[in-house]
Amino acid sequence: MSLKIRTTFFEIRMINLGRAGSTPLECARLDMIGEVVQEFTNTEGAGKLPAVLLGFIKANKEEFYKTKIVPDVDKYAPIIERFLLENGNNGLFSGDRETWVDIFAAETFSKLTDYASHDALDAYPRIQALITRIHNIPAIKEHIAKRKPTPA
């Protein structure tokens, strides 16, 4: 039997590739924001969206979106918007350079517009701007262009 170990949230935070905060306080703030994003990925809506899309959970996609995902977005997206606003008007969570949390949040929330509804984030322009900014980092843009499409 072959065992595959997947990357955990903890490993993402530890590896971070130079995209952590520059002070202990900034690192703690980024960890806090990352935990909020992680909590969003474990909700009844956003957390189960891949299983619905792949057919592991039998549900009508539109109904699931309205009853499960919209309430999750309505709960978490305003918090994320507030965190982005608290850092000024530069579209990032902390400082003036992209951090691991910016990348994590952009990838997490972009799944909503990719797989749930194109207008899922229309009420959240700061999250949309974050996604655009992160997805236009040259290495990330190249990766997105080359990665194989997935159903969820």
Image (cartoon, helix red, strand yellow):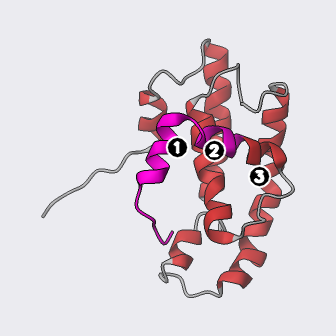
Q: Which residue is mark 3?
A: 76
Residue at numbered disc 2:
105
Query: 101 left or right of 148?
Result: right
Q: Residue 69 in the image: x percent, y percent?
A: 72, 68
- Amino acid type at image mark 1: Lys
Horizontal side, residue 79 vs residue 48: left or right = right
Residue at the image position 61 percent from the left and 69 percent from the top:
115
For the residues labelled 3 and 1, the Cα–Cα distance comes to 26 Å
Q: Main secondary structure of the magenta part?
A: helix
Q: Tell me which amino acid carries mark 3.
A: Tyr
SS at mark 1 in the image: helix
Closest to the camera, between mark 2 and mark 3, is 2
Residue 77 vs residue 123, the one in the foreground: 123
Q: Is residue 3 above or below residue 99?
A: below
Q: Quadrant of residue 62?
A: bottom right
Q: Secondary structure at mark 3?
A: helix
Q: Decide: marks 1, 2 in contact (CB < 8 A)?
A: no
Callout 2–callout 3 Cβ contact below 8 Å: no
Q: Earlier in the sequence, mark 3 or mark 1?
A: 3
For the residues marked 2 and 3, what is the alpha-carbon distance in whole angstroms?
11 Å
Q: Residue at x 69, y 79 (%)?
A: 64
- Label 1, on which residue? 141
Closer to the camera in the image, 14 or 53 = 53
Residue 131 in the magenta stretch? The answer is: yes
Q: Residue at x 75, y 62 (%)?
A: 72
- Provide residue 137's location: percent of width, then percent of height: 56, 35
Badge 2 amino acid = Ala
**Magenta extent:** 130-152
- Does the image show residue 43? no
Whether residues under marks 3 and 1 lie with C-beta atoms below 8 angstroms apart, the answer is no
N-term mark: 2 or 3: 3
Where is residue 40? Give x, y as percent. 66, 54
